[in-house]
Image (cartoon, rainbow, N blue to C red):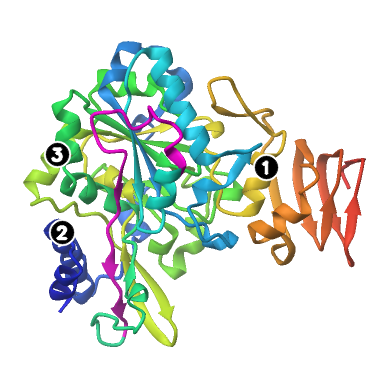
C-alpha cells in the first residue's frame, strides 16, 4: 500500500526504496534507539581543532558548492512562510544576508561558487521570489534549489498508511537526512562533479554563522577526508540536544535525543562524558558520496529516528533521519571543533532577539560575528514573546543592548522602549504590563 501511495503521489523510485528500507526496520521491531552499550566517548584523534589550522588555499574554492537547508516554516514562532524571510539585521532577512555572503565570496575570490537551497513545497515559491532581486545569484552551473521529499505517516495501531481527509496531514518531512537522496535523484551530484566541483558545505539557513571557510576546505582536501562535521563544546545549555559519540568499531556517530533510551537520559546529558554537539555544518566529498550511493542502489542507510506524533485523534509514527548521522557511514570521517560563533541558529524568538541585538554585528563581508565572548542565555516568557508578532510588538521601538549581558530572563508582559541596556545577570518580572525606557540595569 505504501508503494502504491507514494507512486500515485509522484515520488521518485529512490525515495520509495529509502522509505521501504526504513519501514521494514520498523516492522522488524527496531526502536530507533542507540544505547550507551553501543557507543563510547569520541577519540580525540578524530577531532580536528579549527584553531590549529593555518593553511588556506584560495585556489581550492572552485571545487566547492554551498547548500542551505531552507525547508522550515518556523511554525514554533507562529510563522506561515519560510523562516528565512524573517528580518534579522535591520531590514535584511536571512535570505538577503546569505545571498550577499555568496555574492561577496564570488567577487572577492573571482570564483563562481554555486549556492543551492533545499526547499520544501511550503518554502520554494517564497524563497525564489525573495532571491529574484539578486539577478546574479542563480547564474551558476546547477539549479538554485531543489525540493526535499516526503514520507507517508504510519498508523501506530496497524502500521498502515494514515488516510486523513486532509491529505497534507498524511505526509511528513523525512528529516534533513533526506538531502542525500535528493542530491542523487535530482542529478545534482553528477552535475557538480561534471564541472569540477568535488565538495559541498551544507548548513541551516537560520544559522548565519555558517560561512564557507577556506581553512576547513583546504584541510579536508589535503587530508583526503570524505566527511567532516563541525562540532562545538557542549555546555549546560546544550545538554538536552544530540551529541557526538564513537561506535565500538571506531566510527564516529551522531546520537540524537530521540534515540536515547529513557533510562539513559542522565548519562546522555553528561557534558563531560559526551562533550561535543553537532552544529549541522557539514562538509562532504561528492565522489565518496556518489560511490556509496552507487554501491547501495542509491539508498543511504542512516540510523533511524522513530518520531511518535498525533494527527487529530490518531497516533502515528514519523520515520526520520538526520543528515549528520552520515558521519558513521564514511570510514575516515572526522569532526572539527569550531568556535561558537559558527553556530548561531534561530529556533525561537529568544534566539532571534540575541541576533537582533548588539551582541552580534554584521561585518563588511556580511558575516555575522559575535561581539563578545560571553555565553549568552536568553529566556523570554513564551506567553508574551513566543510568537514573532508578539516579540516584534514588544521590541518595536528599539532592541535592548545585550552585548554585556550573560543571562537575560523575562517573565511577564514587558515592552522595551528606547535606550535600554542590560549587563551581567538580569531577571525581569512583571505582574502587570510594563514599559521600560532609557534604563541601564546591571545584575538585577
Can residue 334 be seen in this snapshot?
A: yes
Which sits in the foreground, 243 or 135? 135
Q: Is 223 left or right of 195, judged from the image as shown? A: right
**Foreground label between 1 and 2:** 2
**Which residue position is annotated with label 3?**
290
**Which residue position is annotated with label 2?**
12
The residues bearing labels 1 and 2 have C-alpha atoms spaced at a distance of 41 Å
Kindly state the secondary structure of the residue where label 3 is placed: helix
Q: Main secondary structure of the magenta part?
A: loop
State the residue at coordinates (39%, 74%): 308
Where residue 141 appears, as percent x and y from the top left, is: 23, 29
> Residue 145 occupies which quadrant of the picture?
top left
Where residue 69 appears, as percent x and y from the top left, is: 39, 46
Decide whether residue 137 is among the magenta residues. yes
Kindly state the secondary structure of the residue where label 2 is placed: loop
The residues bearing labels 3 and 2 have C-alpha atoms spaced at a distance of 18 Å
Decide whether residue 28 is among the magenta residues. no
Q: Does residue 383 lie above or below 169 as drawn?
A: above
Label 1 neighbour load within 10 Å: few <14, some 14-19, many 20+: many
In primary-sequence order, the first of circles 3 and 2 is: 2
State the residue at coordinates (60%, 54%): 348
Kindly state the secondary structure of the residue where label 1 is placed: helix
Label at residue 426: none
**Which residue position is annotated with label 1?**
354
Can residue 209 be seen in this snapshot?
A: no
The residues bearing labels 1 and 3 have C-alpha atoms spaced at a distance of 40 Å
Amino acid at each position: 500500500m505504501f508503494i502504491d501511495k507514494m507512486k500515485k503521489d509522484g515520488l521518485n523510485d529512490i525515495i520509495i526504496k529509502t522509505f521501504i528500507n526504513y519501514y521494514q526496520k520498523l516492522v522488524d521491531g527496531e526502536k530507533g534507539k542507540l544505547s550507551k552499550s553501543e557507543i563510547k566517548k569520541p577519540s580525540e584523534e578524530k577531532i580536528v581543532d579549527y584553531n590549529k589550522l593555518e593553511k588556506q588555499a584560495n585556489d581550492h574554492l572552485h571545487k566547492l558548492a554551498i547548500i542551505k537547508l531552507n525547508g522550515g516554516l518556523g511554525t514554533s514562532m507562529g510563522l506561515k512562510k519560510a523562516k528565512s524571510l524573517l528580518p534579522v539585521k535591520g531590514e535584511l532577512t536571512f535570505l538577503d544576508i546569505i545571498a550577499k555572503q555568496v555574492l561577496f565570496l564570488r567577487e572577492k575570490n573571482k570564483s563562481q561558487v554555486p549556492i543551492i537551497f533545499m526547499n520544501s513545497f511550503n518554502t520554494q515559491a517564497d524563497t525564489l521570489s525573495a532571491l529574484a532581486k539578486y539577478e546574479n545569484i542563480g547564474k551558476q552551473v546547477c539549479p538554485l534549489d531543489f525540493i526535499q521529499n516526503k514520507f507517508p505517516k504510519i498508523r501506530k495501531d496497524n502500521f498502515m498508511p494514515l488516510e486523513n481527509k486532509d491529505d497534507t496531514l498524511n505526509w511528513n518531512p523525512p528529516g534533513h537526512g533526506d538531502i542525500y537522496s535528493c542530491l542523487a535523484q535530482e542529478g545534482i551530484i553528477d552535475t557538480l562533479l561534471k564541472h569540477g566541483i568535488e565538495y559541498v558545505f551544507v548548513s541551516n539557513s537560520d544559522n548565519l554563522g555558517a560561512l564557507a571557510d577556506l581553512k576547513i576546505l583546504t584541510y579536508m582536501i589535503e587530508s583526503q577526508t570524505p566527511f567532516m562535521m563541525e562540532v562545538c563544546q557542549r555546555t549546560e545549555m546544550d545538554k538536552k540536544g544530540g551529541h557526538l559519540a564513537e561506535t565500538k568499531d571506531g566510527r564516529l556517530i551522531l546520537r540524537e535525543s530521540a534515540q536515547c533510551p529513557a533510562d539513559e537520559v542522565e548519562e546522555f546529558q553528561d557534558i563531560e562524558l559526551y562533550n561535543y554537539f553537532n552544529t549541522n555544518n557539514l562538509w562532504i566529498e561528492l565522489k565518496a558520496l556518489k560511490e556509496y550511493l552507487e554501491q547501495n542502489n542509491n539508498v543511504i542507510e542512516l540510523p533511524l529516528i522513530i518520531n511518535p506524533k498525533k494527527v487529530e485523534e490518531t497516533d502515528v509514527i514519523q520515520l526520520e533521519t538526520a543528515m549528520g548521522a552520515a558521519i558513521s557511514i564514511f570510514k575516515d570521517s572526522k569532526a572539527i571543533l569550531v568556535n561558537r560563533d559558527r553556530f548561531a541558529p534561530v529556533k525561537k524568538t529568544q534566539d532571534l532577539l540575541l541576533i537582533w541585538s548588539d551582541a552580534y554585528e554584521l561585518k563588511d563581508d556580511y558575516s555575522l560575528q559575535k561581539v563578545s565572548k560571553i555565553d549568552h542565555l536568553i529566556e523570554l516568557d513564551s506567553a508574551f514573546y513566543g510568537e514573532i508578532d508578539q516579540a516584534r510588538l514588544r521590541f518595536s521601538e528599539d532592541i535592548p543592548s545585550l552585548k554585556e549581558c550573560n543571562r537575560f530572563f523575562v517573565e511577564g508582559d514587558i515592552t522595551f522602549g528606547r535606550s535600554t541596556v542590560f549587563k551581567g545577570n538580569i531577571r525581569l518580572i512583571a505582574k502587570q504590563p510594563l514599559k521600560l525606557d532609557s534604563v541601564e540595569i546591571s545584575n538585577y
